[in-house]
């Protein structure tokens, strides 16, 4: 039997020794229609070995799930048995470990192979970080602070631990969570995440909030009165601590309010997006706007505009991609993709001759540098020119 040129590559893949060049060659092979029978048999045998030896870790399985939508459309044409198609094809791609991703635009019939490539000019991805503004107006750049107590306000100790801020211990020995409903005068803080930053904090009542880039949260250091109330801009994900006697309220741009007792939900309220989108993952929320009010069930999204409010079934995986470290560009236009890149890489985007009409599918890690992302997009017939932090989309 003749020696198959992919035999050594598959063996090195299983041993974790595959090179980026070999990885690209393997994925190029996966994206073609014509394959010789021996190579196909070898691929299936090695994939079955991966599965049977349970080499797919939880972390790898999560990555596989994140990349499957971009992979499966092509894998169906490879005549791979359905019983191993979903996990095995993804495993073969992701075990490569060479920074290669599947990405495609709807203008193409074949998915594009996106590979990490060196660039003379590059911008690093966003990271954990935020600016904390205290009640007296003083500010702290949390990126540069170490673990420990950063401030004490209104009897609440503010602690930074591994990039997360919490308001939990009271200086007098009590707990801030017990302060819900007290008559103590509230002091307000503001958490701001600039472009290229995201952050997590825990409020005095135990509610956890994640802020995406270019967002802010205005909140009390201890909740007083009958309601727990905060103001948000940009995008944030909430896990609200249950407190039946004190409903939790989120105010958005003075036009929309989300009311909740205890639940998990995401708010996207960027001013450059077409609507304010509230997506419910767990529990129940009421969305109130100038144009009406609705009650959401898990999996539903309220899209609020100045003159209308609509409820749709949400793609919750796509909604939560930012929190899970992923760009999800499923059904996204080029303009939508660029808005996400502007916020995460702190860049300005301009279009030299209008906005190309392109719609994308696929997912990418938010840990990629800008050049790596642009390399994938350029393979989808989009071209760019980067001038400092200005990105020009070329015709």
Image (cartoon, rainbow, N blue to C red):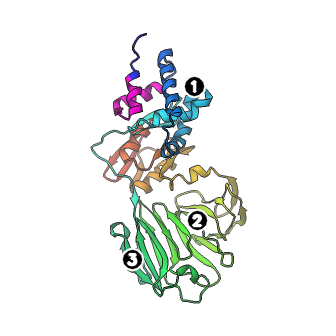
> Is 14 a magenta residue?
yes
**Residue on which disc 3 sits:** 149
Marks 2/3: CA distance? Answer: 24 Å
Residue at 42% x, 32% y: name it.
Answer: 14
Tag on residue 80? 1
Q: Any magenta on residue 332? A: no
Q: Which of marks 2 and 3 is nearer the N terminus?
A: 3
Placement of 294 over or under 39, stated as above or below: below
**Whole-percent x and y of residue 43?**
48, 24
The answer to which quarter of the image holds residue 185 is: bottom right
Q: In this view, does 340 lie above or below 262?
A: above
Label whose residue precedes the other's in the sequence (2 or 1): 1
> Which residue, as the protein is rendered here, is positioned at the far top?
1
Is residue 69 at all visible to an observer of this figure?
yes
Q: What percent of the width, then of the height, locates residue 314? A: 65, 52
Toward the left, the furthest residue is 120
Residue at horizontal 46 percent and vertical 34 percent from the top = 93
Q: Give the range drawn in magenta.
A: 8-31
- Asked if the residue under mark 1 is in contact with the one under mark 2, i.e. CB atoms within 8 Å, the reply is no
Q: From the image, give the main secondary structure of the stretch colored magenta.
A: helix
SS type, badge 1: loop
- Which SS class for mark 3? strand
Decide which of tag 3 and tag 1 comes sooner along the chain: 1
Location of mark 2 (residue): 239
Mark 2, other Cα within 10 Å: few <14 / some 14–19 / many ≥20? some
């Amino acid at each position: 039997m003749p020696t198959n040129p992919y035999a050594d590559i598959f063996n090195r893949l299983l041993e974790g020794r595959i090179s980026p060049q070999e990885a690209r060659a393997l994925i190029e092979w996966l994206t073609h229609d014509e394959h010789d029978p021996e190579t196909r048999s070898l691929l299936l045998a090695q994939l079955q070995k991966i599965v049977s030896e349970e080499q797919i870790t939880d972390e790898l399985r999560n990555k596989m799930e994140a990349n499957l939508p971009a992979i499966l459309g092509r894998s169906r044409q490879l005549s791979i048995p359905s019983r191993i198609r979903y996990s095995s094809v993804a495993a073969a791609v992701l075990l490569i470990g060479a920074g290669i991703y599947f990405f495609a635009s709807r203008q193409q019939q074949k998915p594009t192979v996106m590979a990490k490539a060196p660039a003379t000019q590059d911008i690093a991805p966003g990271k954990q970080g935020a600016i904390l503004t205290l009640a007296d107006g003083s500010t702290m750049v949390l990126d540069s602070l170490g673990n420990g107590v950063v401030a004490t306000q209104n009897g609440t100790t503010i602690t930074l631990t591994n990039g997360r801020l919490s308001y939990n211990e009271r200086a007098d020995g009590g707990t801030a969570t017990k302060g819900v409903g007290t008559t103590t005068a509230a002091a307000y803080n503001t958490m701001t995440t600039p472009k290229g930053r995201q952050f997590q904090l825990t409020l005095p009542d135990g509610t956890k909030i994640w802020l995406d880039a270019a967002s802010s949260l205005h909140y009390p250091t201890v909740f007083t009165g009958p309601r727990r109330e905060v103001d948000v801009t940009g995008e944030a994900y909430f896990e609200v601590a249950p407190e039946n006697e004190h409903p939790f309220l989120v105010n958005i741009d003075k036009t929309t309010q989300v009311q909740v007792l205890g639940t998990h939900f995401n708010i996207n309220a960027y001013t450059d997006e077409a609507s304010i989108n509230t997506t419910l993952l767990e529990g129940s929320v009421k969305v109130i706007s100038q144009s009406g009010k609705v009650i959401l069930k898990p999996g539903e999204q309220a899209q609020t505009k100045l003159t209308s409010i609509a409820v749709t079934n949400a793609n919750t995986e796509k909604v939560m991609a930012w929190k899970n470290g992923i760009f999800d560009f499923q059904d996204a236009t080029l303009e939508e993709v660029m808005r996400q890149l502007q916020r995460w890489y702190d860049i300005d985007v301009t279009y030299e001759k209008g906005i190309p009409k392109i719609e994308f599918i696929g997912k990418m890690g938010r840990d990629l540098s800008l050049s790596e992302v642009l390399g994938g997009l350029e393979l989808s017939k989009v071209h760019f020119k980067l001038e400092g932090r200005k990105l020009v989309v070329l015709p």
